[in-house]
Image: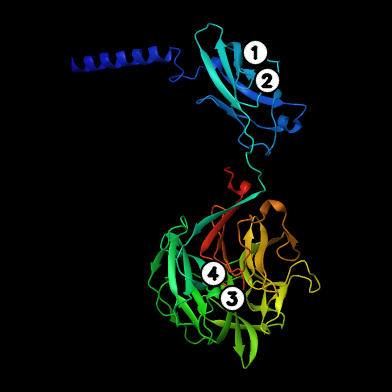
Amino acid sequence: MKNKIVLFLAGCLVLLMNSCLGSDDAEYEIPKNCQITSFTMKSDSVPELSKVNFTIDQLSGYIFNIDSMAYGTEIEKVVCTVNFASGVAQVQVVQEAAGDTIVWNGTDSLDFSKPVTFITHSYDGQFSKKYIAKVNIHQVVPDSMVWTLYAENVTDLSIDEEKVVAFDSGNTNYYYMYVKPAAQNGYKLFRSAASDAKNWEELPLTGLPDNEILLSQITESQGALYAPGTKGVVYQSVNGQDWKALNNTPTVKYLLGAIKVGGVNQPPVLASIIDKDGSLLFAAMNESLTWTEGNIVPANFPVSGFGSANHNVMYKERLTVACGKSNSGQLCNSVWATMDGTSWAILTDEDDDSLEPCDGAMLARYDDKLFILGGVNSSGQASKTIYNSIDNGVSWSVIDTMVVFPETYKARGFSSVIVDKENFMFVFGGKTGNNAKVLDEIWRGRINRLGFKD
């Protein structure tokens, strides 16, 4: 008897569901005999419209193009080619732009400057289906870069030097900001989650001797941070806070950057310049903290104030440095690169003056190009010029007006530049001149199209 009652209740439930599905409420059923099955557009004034693919979301009733059309495209009167299921008898069209509702004959042009609604009706009059069709158009200039003052008064200190590095701690990506306050001999450390970069906490810092660190050359390599000292000592930290001097190292004068694991037979190394018997040599330290000596450093090679960036070229990792100041104090406008840290090649023509010689240049890999931002020239004048190179540093040109810094951005050099996973370029601090204090602010920019969702 109990089983019969259960079966009876189940049968009632089925009948109730069938009753709902047979109703006109589209929430419970997609009436297939009223569906739009394909959708295209064409316009004599917008030839590329005929190549746009439209997606039909049968569940939600939206028709749209996933790949937005170019910024500034104007869509008004267009001819639609629409295929319907065999059960469609009549189509009403609501033109939002025109403010009217018509019975559409399938050939009249429609105004798509605003969304257009298609309402299909079945022959038996029991079913209807509503679709909202829209042409997606980029609302910003895709190649324009929007810069904003992202944060200011980050440390509330008067700062002589600053360096910001991206460094992972456990499962969290952080930015570590090392500063030398003007009012004291030591250094301070601030940290922010890379996903934030607005809220910074001060952390204890140990092991770095006062006034003996080339702060601008702190480098992340192989899961640790390295800092060169002014007395030839290299300091290492595995957590960003606690530092110790490395033993059994050559006399290290400068750190140039890091090379990541590359293709076949390309191990990661820390690239440097060492002093051996009074001569400057290139050298590289591998994962085992073993040092390999390289070539003699050319007289026109920058040893300070250069921009440094690690990037991939044809499945090989490359370290590139640009501009800066040579060992003799001469300002450079050259660009150099290496794949092993011990042998370097000059990429730019020595007679090429497309780059202005400068100190404190910022170099970054962005949008599959190399960018040089700002710097301080021989007259002590800071720049806000942005150069880019499409051939990995061989030739350079001043970038066009769509990526320039805004008027409110102060010309500067000696900033830290980091590109995050969301394709934002961060510019941390910087100086308006060689002897100026560090600007206690962060700027952020992104080329619009690099933020478009797939």
Mark 3 highlights which residue? 435
Inspect the image, locate mark 3, and give the three-letter code of the amino acid beneath it.
Asn
Q: Nearer the viewer, mark 1 or mark 2?
A: 2
* Secondary structure at numbered mark 4: loop
Could you tell which of marks 4 and 1 lies nearer the N-terminus? 1
Image marks 2 and 3: residues in contact by CB distance under 8 Å? no
What distance separates the C-alpha of mark 4 from that of mark 1? Answer: 66 Å
* Secondary structure at numbered mark 2: strand
What distance separates the C-alpha of mark 2 from that of mark 3? Answer: 64 Å
Q: Could you say where residue 129 lies in the image, as x and y percent from the top left?
A: 53, 17
Image marks 1 and 2: residues in contact by CB distance under 8 Å? yes
Q: Could you say where residue 254 lies in the image, as x and y percent from the top left?
A: 58, 80
Image marks 3 and 1: residues in contact by CB distance under 8 Å? no
Could you tell which of marks 3 and 1 lies nearer the N-terminus? 1
Inspect the image, locate mark 2, and give the three-letter code of the amino acid beneath it.
Leu
Q: Which mark is residue 110?
A: 2
Mark 1 highlights which residue? 104
Mark 4 highlights which residue? 438
